[in-house]
Image (cartoon, grey):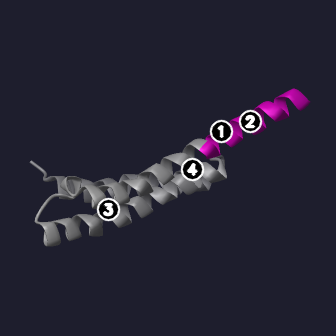
Amino acid sequence: MMNKETLFALSLFPYLGFLWFMTKSQQTPKGALIGFYLLLVFVGVTIPAGIYAKTVYNAELANVDWLHGSAESFLTLTNIFVVIGFQQAIRAAKSNRTES
């Protein structure tokens, strides 16, 4: 059976493919696309935070509240960008539809 670290690393490849297609299609709202890219920042922050938690506290990241919460704030930021990006696109589409 595959361990969680290997699965996590392998999951980046499909996500990078997703980002490539979303960018290439040019149909994804800009704010949402920024949010999807920010998820990579979340991953980039989470990995060193996990290593720090293991090295300094000898614990999993999820068990070091201040560190885990700080890393998760990047996930929250990602979600905010995605939601606002799609919300703006929906409003723009409704506005265009009523003007026609």
Q: Disc 1, disc 2: CB below 8 Å?
A: yes
Could you classify mark 2 by the number of other residues whose Cα lies within 10 Å: few (under 14), some (14-19), or many (20 or more)? few
SS at badge 2: helix
Q: Tell me how far mark 1 sits from mark 3, CA to CA.
A: 28 Å
The residue that disc 2 covers is 91
Q: What's the amino acid at mark 1?
A: Gln
Q: What's the amino acid at mark 4?
A: Phe
Any magenta on residue 1? no
Span shown in magenta: 84-100
Which dot marks residue 87? 1
Could you classify mark 1 by the number of other residues whose Cα lies within 10 Å: few (under 14), some (14-19), or many (20 or more)? some
- The front one of 19 and 89 is 89
SS at badge 4: helix
Q: What's the amino acid at mark 2?
A: Arg
Of callouts 2 and 4, which one flags the residue occurring earlier in the amino acid sequence? 4
The residue that disc 3 covers is 46
Of callouts 3 and 2, which one flags the residue occurring earlier in the amino acid sequence? 3
Q: Position of residue 34 (x, y in %)?
A: 57, 56
The residue that disc 4 covers is 81
**Which residue does the image show at 28% across and 70% down from the upper left?**
48
